[in-house]
């Protein structure tokens, strides 16, 4: 199993949506790759390529086509060598732990209700890491950093170096971005 402390030392994660971005991420300096659009036919090869590049492979279970959002789907991903998963679903986080997968639970913070719901889900699921979206909401990152005992990834709508720095300064441990030019930042 991946050591979460080692993982969060990697300050930028590549959020991959396209084949072009995948190839770029493999050649980049990032060490954590979030595969946002995997499918049952390509996940094994994608994970193999990520690992061959010396990087960690995480699959977003909610978007993975042909892979069940259930215990069997998680077992399949573990057998493919996936290091961890991303999901918004509390039950998926809990099941993924059975297969020694690092769990990243994503929370979309749009209002105070979603904040309260997220805090409750955090208490129930006990993910290894949480991702707060959008990542440019540094005020909420700061609040979560004060109450959360798990590492925080800031993701979503982060488009500039300044936004990366603001998220990290607010208490995020890692920034997840699809902006290729930010993947090579030295922070």
Image: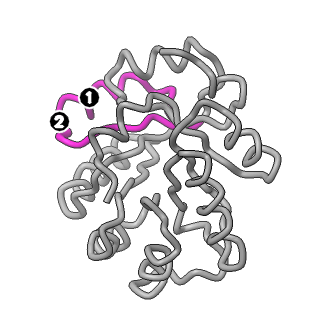
Residue 70, picture quadrant? bottom left
From the top left corner, tell me how far across and down residue 9 is, in percent.
Answer: 36, 31
Is 52 included in the stretch rendered in magenta? no
| Depicted 62 relative to depicted 149: above or below | below
Identify the residue at horizontal 38%, vertical 55% (top origin). Answer: 105
Badge 1 marks a residue whose secondary structure is helix
| Depicted 1 relative to depicted 148: above or below | below
Asked whether 66 or 9 is in front, the reply is 9
Q: Residues within 10 Å of mark 1 (few under 14, many from 20)?
A: few
Which residue is tagged 2? 147
Q: Residues within 10 Å of mark 2 (few under 14, many from 20)?
A: few
Is residue 137 found left or right of 64 in the rendered image? left
The span from disc 1 to disc 2 (Cα, nearest Å) is 7 Å
Which residue is tagged 1? 143
Circles 1 and 2, Cβ within 8 Å, touching? The answer is yes
| Depicted 12 relative to depicted 87: above or below | above
From the top left corner, tell me how far across and down residue 177 is, in percent.
Answer: 60, 35
The magenta span reads: 135-156
């Amino acid at each position: 199993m991946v050591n979460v402390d080692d993982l969060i030392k990697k300050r930028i994660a590549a959020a991959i949506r396209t084949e072009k971005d995948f190839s770029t991420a493999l050649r980049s300096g990032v060490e954590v790759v979030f595969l946002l659009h995997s499918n049952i036919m390509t996940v094994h090869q994608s994970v193999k390529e990520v690992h061959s590049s010396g990087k960690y492979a995480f699959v977003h279970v909610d978007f993975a086509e042909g892979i069940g959002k259930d215990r069997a789907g998680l077992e399949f991903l573990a057998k493919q060598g996936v290091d961890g998963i991303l999901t918004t679903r509390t039950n998926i986080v809990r099941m993924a732990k059975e297969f020694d997968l690092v769990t990243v639970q994503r929370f979309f913070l749009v209002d105070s209700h979603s904040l309260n719901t997220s805090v409750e889900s955090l208490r129930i699921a006990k993910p290894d890491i949480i991702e707060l979206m959008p990542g440019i909401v540094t005020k909420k990152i700061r609040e979560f950093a004060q109450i959360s005992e798990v590492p925080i990834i800031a993701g979503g709508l982060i488009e500039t170096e300044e936004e990366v720095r603001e998220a990290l300064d607010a208490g995020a441990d890692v920034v997840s971005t699809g902006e290729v030019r930010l993947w090579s930042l030295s922070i």
